Image: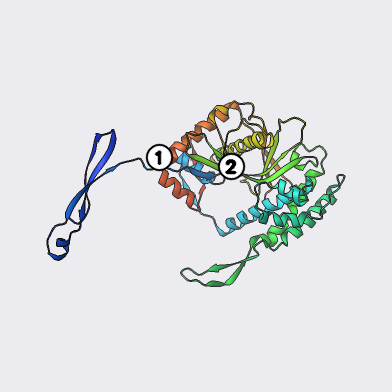
Amino acid sequence: MSKQEEQPVDTSVDDKIYQSSFRPQPTFLEKIIEGHNPVLRTRRNEIKEPPTSAIRVSVSAFRKLFPWYLHQIGRLSPLTESHRSPDSEQSAEIGSWLHKVDNLYRSIIHGNTTEELVKKSFPSMSEEDRLPFEVALRDVDLPQVAGKDEIAQTLVDAYKIFRGQPGWVKATTRGLPGFDMQDAGVKISTIFSDQSHQRALLLAESWAREASNPKNTYWLFRRNARSEGEVRMILNFSDDLKLQLSGQLDCISWIPLAHSRVVTQVQDLKTGWPTEPSPAFEEMIRFESWLMTTLAERYTVAKLGESEVTKRQGNSYVFQPTHIDNKEFNGRTRMDYRVLSRGDDAFTFIHQGFTAEERKYNVDVIQDIDRVIHENELEARKLMSYNVQFDLRRAILKPR
């Protein structure tokens, strides 16, 4: 017998499940006498459930996880993959860059221009990542009475310094598959393209228009507001769920008050939006905005409001289903998408508010997503590791 021979499962001992196996033990005679059988030794192993680690999903990754979930429960079909084209890759790269420029403009409007204030303004950012902001903001002094043109010029001047920092990757080389060699061709980073530059200038115009409007109700553009950007955090959906959510608040702003009940606003920048969003896209974006709101509410209560209501685990927050109707959280954050599509120089604001019924429904959904993920864990993990999106334009979504 050259291989391990498996035996039937034995459940008769200690209420545990064991499986016996015979393993060949080589002997001296086996080595010198042809045909001599080895000694068989018996081993009993306890069968245990394989450990399942928590699955951490970013808010952006829900763009592929949520359609997959809807397909798994039979509400969405067909589920068609849509791999990114070079143009969409370029748009994504420009979008990521514009988010950084957006936070540069925010820092100027709110007067976060000293090294210490920049550090407070980006609580999750490393010292190395903050450096380009510190250099670009060092000599900025925007008067409180500045008008639209002066604001726009100040933003553009700081942007040019920001763009010229050596920390940004200006060119990349492409490796040849299978060789430790570099391609002779050099690809200039998209953030230094003319398209990227023009969109950053249009973004400055949009900020100047909003910040110079005395009737603006969005605190992001109010000179007396406080704000933070690129705030990274983790949310655990109670101790019963394995699902973890990692997210980043692009900009969260608030007006300083004498009491501790801070109320915040989140205006998430979107550099593109479908002209005719499908029902599947609309449901996905609603769920995504609820996730962002949930993150922001807990950050508002625990971090900004200095409350002990929110349970924390290390650097993460815990979402308890009992908090669905808790007024300590609900209503603490106003969530809006701030859309600036290609060629636009004015923001379009899309408000995202939630009724008590919608909140309860979304909690049920997140619990069901957790169930579906762990029933199909291998497939879910593969999905998270692939750079793929789903085409929702022609997908049919069944009612709830």
Quick check: marks 2 and 1 in contact, CB under 8 Å? no
N-terminal of the two: label 2 or label 1?
2
Front position in the image: 2 or 244? 2
Q: Taking 173 as reference, is 26 above or below it?
A: above
User: Where on the picture, by quarter, is residue 304?
Assistant: top right
Front position in the image: 252 or 280? 252
User: Where on the picture, by quarter, is residue 315?
Assistant: top right
Write down the residue under mark 1.
Answer: 375
Q: Residue at x 60, y 70 (%)?
A: 186
Amino acid tagged 1: Glu
User: Where on the picture, by quarter, is residue 128?
Assistant: bottom right
User: The N terminus is located in which quarter?
Assistant: bottom left
Q: Residues within 10 Å of mark 1 (few under 14, many from 20)?
A: few
Write down the residue under mark 2.
Answer: 315
Secondary structure type for disc 1: helix
Secondary structure type for disc 2: loop
Amino acid tagged 2: Asn
Specify whether residue 387 is in view.
Answer: yes
Q: Residues within 10 Å of mark 2 (few under 14, many from 20)?
A: few
